[in-house]
Image (cartoon, grey):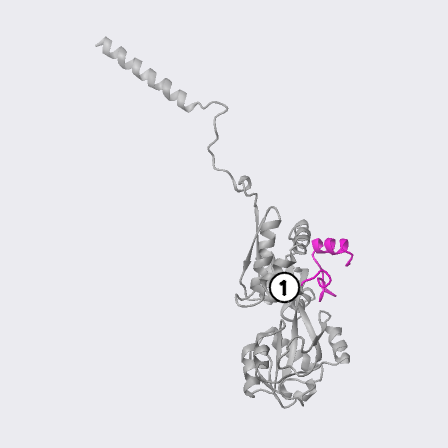
Amino acid sequence: MKKALALFLALVMTMALVACGETSAPADSTNTTEPTQESTPSGKSEYLSLGTGGVTGTYYPLGGALANIITNNIDGYTCTAESTGGAVENCWMLSRGEIDLGFVDASSIYQAQHSLGDFSDGKAANVKGVVSIYPEVVQLISCNPSITSIADLKGKKVAVGSAGSGTEVMARTLLELYDMTYDDIEEDFLGFGDASTGLKDKTLDAAIIWAGMPTSGLLELGAQNDFYIIDIPADKLAELKETQPFCIEFTVDSSVYPNGLKNSGTTIGVPATICAREDLDEQFVYDFLDTLFGNLDMVADAHAQGANLTLESALNGYDDTTLHPGAVKFYTEKGLL
């Protein structure tokens, strides 16, 4: 019995020693703790969102190209292009910090920073300008050669854009230049496609189309119909610029629409721009612009409108717009400010 008890006690002591040895790891043993995000090999620690527009529009493919330029060339950042409701929504999302970069037309950023129009509450005044990408041109179109001025639209049936759209706001602004309102015309709230069809079917006398050129609906119209651009004279353009300094003068002629367009005329363009949330890192914005202008071919390949982006046009429409500090640094070095 004593011998059996001794053997049992020896066995217990041996097991205890083994257990102590297993729980006492040597000082140079391998740490099996999972690595944190900051220690991942990719080095990507900040994820950015770039607001675009609908997936069938111009903003979306251009936004994808810009996101790829950021992800593939700027260390420490990964960027994704997101489909959104477009320029006005992007401005609001930037103001709330829900996205980091976004397409915002020059008129919207101007109104946001000056607490005008849809942004009269001042809550989007913190959004900052970065770069102007391409002009969205206001095209006043008619198939009637006798309509040569906005004043000639009195009593006519005119497509003014979808209700509440930027085009519709611009239509009211242009009518005001001639002391006119919707009471003076037969307004029809039609988008670009329906407006082009209405001109083709002669159910409309004129249409206001605000888009990048060439606009697909007008290319289709010109395939079978003659059409004319309604000119905005120099004095009216100057008057418009007093309240809308973001507008740039633009000429539409047969070089844009070789089939169908029978005259040339002067109108306005409002640039589509990239804006940023106010607190986005200054060095990142500088690096983004430096990288962007080193990869213009990628932007041009993404969409035909991307070919309009140049350093010389980068500040178009930003006459009275506050730029992000990173953009100020970049353009100052380039001699543009």
Occupied quadrant, residue 264: bottom right
Residue in view at x 24 percent, y 9 percent = 3
Q: Is residue 88 left or right of residue 244?
A: left
Q: Nearer the viewer, residue 64 or 208?
A: 64
Percent x, y of residue 188: 57, 83
**Magenta highlight on residue 40:** no
Can I make out residue 95 in this image?
Answer: no
Occupied quadrant, residue 178: bottom right
Residue type highlighted by circle 1: Gly
The residue sitting at the top extreme is 2
The residue sitting at the left extreme is 1
The correct choice, above or below, for 56 with respect to 48 in the image is below
Percent x, y of residue 102: 61, 60
The C terminus appears in which quarter of the rendering?
A: bottom right
Q: Nearer the viewer, residue 14 or 160?
A: 160
Q: Is residue 133 left or right of residue 2?
A: right
Q: Is residue 125 left or right of residue 302?
A: right
* Boundaries of the magenta span: 309-337
Q: Nearer the viewer, residue 323 or 231?
A: 231
Occupied quadrant, residue 66: bottom right
Residue placed under numbered mark 1 in the picture:
306
